[in-house]
């Protein structure tokens, strides 16, 4: 019945537990999973000419965030690979504003409204 399961992860023990359950569910139902990690936007705390201690440039911030997200997504990918469940990974930046998902029809399938946005806590697709 379910063909695609979206699995959010933030690297916490609880999200890893959820990922294990999602992999078991996908394996039992012949579904695939997509793991995703929402990353924060770069927001430097600069006031005038003052640069706070520990200031990180945008390139360094991007590098650090990508490394962390890849680590979290890699854990989910390992679980899926061990169970022979097809798994894709996605890293999204946090989006400010309207909710990024909207229903696209009478079923459970959802469509994106905005690029580079965060995604809700769960996604199941019948299609």
Image (cartoon, rainbow, N blue to C red):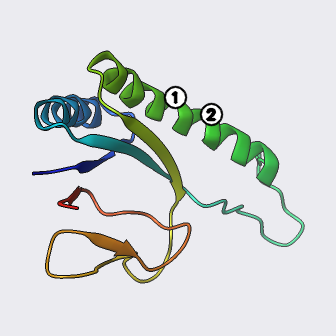
Position of residue 65 in the picture relative to residue 114 (left or right): right
The residue singled out by tag 2 in the image is: 67
Position of residue 48 in the picture relative to residue 74 (left or right): right
The residue singled out by tag 1 in the image is: 71
From the viewer's side, name the closer residue of 14 and 75: 75
From the viewer's side, name the closer residue of 120 and 87: 87
Query: What quarter of the picture does the C terminus occupy?
Result: bottom left
Find residue 90 and report its horizontal and vertical position in percent: 49, 48
Res 57 visible: no
Residue at 41% of width from left, 83% of height from top? 98
Residue at 14% of width from left, 81% of height from top? 106
* Location of residue 108 with respect to 15 vertically, above or below: below
Find residue 71 and report its horizontal and vertical position in percent: 51, 28
Residue at 18% of width from left, 36% of height from top? 30
Mark 2 closeness class: few <14, some 14–19, many ≥20 residues within 10 Å? few
Find residue 33 and report its horizontal and vertical position in percent: 31, 42
Under tag 2, what secondary structure?
A: helix
Position of residue 85 in the picture relative to residue 60 (left or right): left
In contact (CB < 8 Å): disc 1 and disc 2: yes
* Location of residue 15 with respect to 20 vertically, above or below: below
Find residue 45 and report its horizontal and vertical position in percent: 70, 62
From the viewer's side, name the closer residue of 83 and 120: 83
The alpha-carbon separation of the residues under discs 1 and 2 comes to 6 Å
* Numbered mark located on residue 114 in the image: none
Residue furthest to the top in view is 82
Mark 1 closeness class: few <14, some 14–19, many ≥20 residues within 10 Å? some
| Residue 22 location, quadrant | top left
């Amino acid at each position: 019945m379910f063909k695609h399961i979206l699995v959010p992860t933030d690297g916490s023990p609880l999200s890893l537990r959820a990922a294990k359950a999602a992999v078991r569910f996908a394996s039992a139902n012949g579904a695939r999973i997509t793991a995703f990690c929402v990353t924060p936007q770069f927001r430097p705390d600069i006031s005038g000419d003052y640069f706070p201690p520990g200031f990180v440039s945008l390139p360094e911030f991007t590098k650090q965030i990508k490394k962390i997200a890849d680590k979290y997504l890699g854990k989910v990918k390992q679980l899926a690979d061990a169970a022979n469940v097809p798994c894709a990974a996605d890293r999204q930046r946090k989006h400010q504003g309207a909710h990024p998902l909207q229903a696209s029809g009478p079923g459970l399938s959802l469509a994106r409204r905005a690029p580079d946005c965060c995604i809700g806590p769960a996604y199941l697709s019948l299609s």
